Amino acid sequence: MDIFSELQFVLDVAPDRPEIEGIGDILGLVMNLLMGLGIGISAIFIGLAGIKFITSGGDPKAVDQSKRALTYAIVAAIISVGALAFRIILLQVIGVEGQDLIDPVPSF
């Protein structure tokens, strides 16, 4: 069983999805997955940094660590959203059809 048929088997759960036909479809799927993971993980770390800040108890070292963690998490979220915007702009420039955010596989 090759990688295309394995990925198609995974996507068969949602019958509305297009078939994976080449490396461009795989790259589109991976790109969407990584951007979603980046935004989700950033949101989790923003929440964790907020909890760390609240539970710091006024300790200056703990407050500084939580502020630094929050800054890094926000920067990661901005980079993830920027990558999403870059993806949309890039797909429009090269003329890709079917670039909905819901569609995991853009049509190259």
Image (cartoon, grey):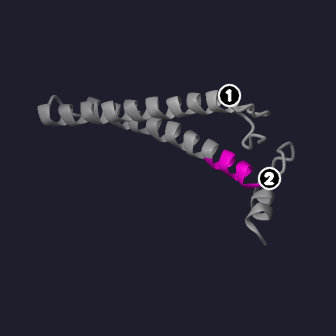
Which one is nearer the viewer's eye here, 36 or 56?
36
| Residue 53 colored in magenta in the image | no
Highlighted magenta segment, given as a residue range: 20-30
Rendered-image quadrant of the C terminus: top right
The x, y position of residue 75, in whole percent, is 38, 31
Mark 1 touching mark 2, by CB under 8 A? no
First-in-chain label (1 vs 2): 2
Taking the spot 25% from the left edge, 34% from the top edge, the residue there is 68
In the drawing, what numbered circle is on residue 53? none
The x, y position of residue 47, in whole percent, is 40, 33
Which SS class for mark 1?
helix
**In the displayed structure, would residue 20 be above or below residue 101?**
below
**In the displayed structure, would residue 8 be above or below residue 65?**
below
The x, y position of residue 79, in whole percent, is 45, 33
Give the residue number, with chain letter if any, for mark 1: 93
Which SS class for mark 2?
loop
Q: Quadrant of residue 4?
A: bottom right
Q: Quadrant of residue 77?
A: top left
Give the residue number, with chain letter if any, for mark 2: 20
Amino acid of disc 1: Val
| Residue 29 colored in magenta in the image | yes
Amino acid of disc 2: Ile
Which one is nearer the viewer's eye here, 52 or 82?
82
> Whole-Å distance between the Cαs marked 1 and 2?
22 Å
